[in-house]
Amino acid sequence: MCLPLYDNLDCINHNPGGKCNDQNTHPKRQQQGISLGWCAMSPETRYKRSRDNWKQKAACRGDTNRYQSKELARIKAERDRFKKELKEIRARVHQLESQGRVIVVQNKVDLIFLALQLFVVARIGFRAVSRVLGIVMGALGLKKSPLSADHHQLGDQALSGAHPICPDATGAAGDEGTVL
Amino acid sequence: MIDMSIGLGTGKILTVLALNAHHHQLSPAAPRLQDVHCMAVSVADSWTGESIAAFLERLIASAGRPAAYLKDGGTDLQKAIRLLDEQGLASPCIDDISHVIANLLKWWYQDQPMLETFLSACGRVSGKLKQTVLACLAPPKVQTKARFMNAHRLIRWAHQLLRLSPAGGARKGSTLSKLRACLDRLPSCRAFIKRFRDDAVQLLECQRVLKAQGLSHFTIAQCEPFIQAIGSSPVRREFVAYVQNQLQIAAKLGLDHIGLPVSSDQIESLFGLGKLHGTGEIKDANRIALRLPALCGTPTRAEAEQVIKISVAEEQQITGRFTSLVKQRREVLPHPDRLESLSTEQAGTHLELIASAKNRENSGEILCLPIPYKKTHGPQLQCQTWRG
């Protein structure tokens, strides 16, 4: 790192003629009880010293700049990496969410298991199970409604007194006054 | 856990449930319907001690011997267990605490003349209150069958109602005077109500503790203050005798420090649920019995897979074998000439389901429930025999 150079620089700036008198002493040195005393430098020395000071300052500035530009590059790279990761994670979350929303019931066993739970745990009736599944079919990713037209027919037949499974059963359809 | 229930028709349902004897070690809560396995369901025209014993023998041969039998106070069940003991299939017999307490109260209070006065007063008060501004004070509904199972509700109501009418005069036309006009002979039963309440409240507190935590040395110590506070000494003495007897059984089973299950509430609630849920308007005994196993435990994916393996036609073929009141009603009501067929068909088939255990070599061994307790489980029932 660069060294403090202000002692000599002050001397040069405040004494352009190259002569220092007793009054032109550095205040810090005065505070410390040290006197620079009288100095007289040749122009060549003055230029050399000025150049050396400039070189030291430039080297110091260069070091700082190089360090800062390196850090900047590192931070930018990190930022880009984090941005990319965030983008990927967001995409993955979205994908998982969309999967979770749609692919709940993947096969028939899942559907039967759900229906069993609705009947045994939630304790809703058989016909209510199919009604509930019909309502939530979109959220469950069901393509075919469990509340099919056949179901309605079966329900209607059962209510009208016809045999719910075999419409041709003896004494089932077409009889007046049949009640369940 | 063994119990019987009735539905519509000639059939009586006998059900056997299995509960892990170490339930109170495995779970902090009282046993629920999800914690029991249905081991067997059978419907028959009548059940005697002999027929129950024969049925239990078949079940033991198939699934193993239980560590103990938990039952209500039915004499036919007692006889069946005695017959099994004679055949060397003995297991200790635990009595359900709710039935014991109800029977104790019945034994002590049934013959007391004030009981009739109190019950008739409750009926009249109910009639006077129901269509008035005081309708909210009407008594709770208590069925006449197994009256002493719920008599405490009526007593608690009467006690609270009498507290609304303190001693002293009431202004004419005030709500208090209207209430007093409805009380009938209830104030004269005040001493009876207090006596019954002193017994019932303490017994019910003991019941609450023992049902939730099982019967053990620790829970008996918890119940001790309530037992001491029971007003009638014969009731207290009989209850202590019951507790000591059950504690001996618990010690025999190694459960006296864990907690012996003493409540058959699960089987009672199973019957209640079976009659309400999924059976339709006609509470056919066979139809109820067919659904009982599914209502125990928690459904599993394995059971869902079993559903796929059976077709609708096969299922209809199986269920079509036994008598169906719905089918009979559908066939007979519109055809008067078919009335006679009812008596011939009535001697038809009844349902019987018995759980089977795979690779069981020794049929006399104590039944161990194979599935870990905390995991979801469900009965694996197979239709074994169809009685004709």
Image (tube, coloured by chain):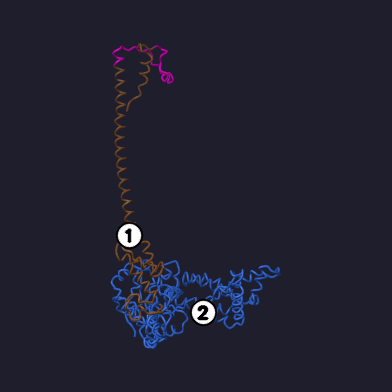
Chain colours: A brown, B blue
Which of the 4 image quadrants contains residue A106? bottom left
Are circles 2 and 1 on residues that touch, CB within 8 Å? no
What SS does tag 2 mark?
A: loop
Q: Quadrant of the N terminus of chain B?
A: bottom left
Asked if residue A40 lies in the magenta stretch, the reply is yes
Q: Position of residue A28 (x, y in %)?
A: 42, 20
Q: Which residues are magenta?
A: A21-47
Q: Quadrant of residue B161?
A: bottom right
Which chain contains the residue that carries disc 2? Answer: B
Q: Which mark is residue B34?
A: none
The residue identified by callout 1 is A141
| Type of amino acid at the residue the image marks with label 2 | Ala
Locate residue A32, reporting x and y percent. Answer: 42, 21
- Answer left or right for B360 relative to B276: left
Local crowd size for mark 1, using a 10 Å CA cut-off: few (<14), some (14–19), many (≥20): some
Q: Does A100 lie within the magenta span? A: no
How far is disc 2 from disc 1 in space, using C-alphas? 50 Å
Q: Which residue is identified by label 2?
A: B146
User: Which residue is located at x 58 percent, y 69 percent?
Assistant: B136
Question: Which chain's residue wears label 1?
Answer: A
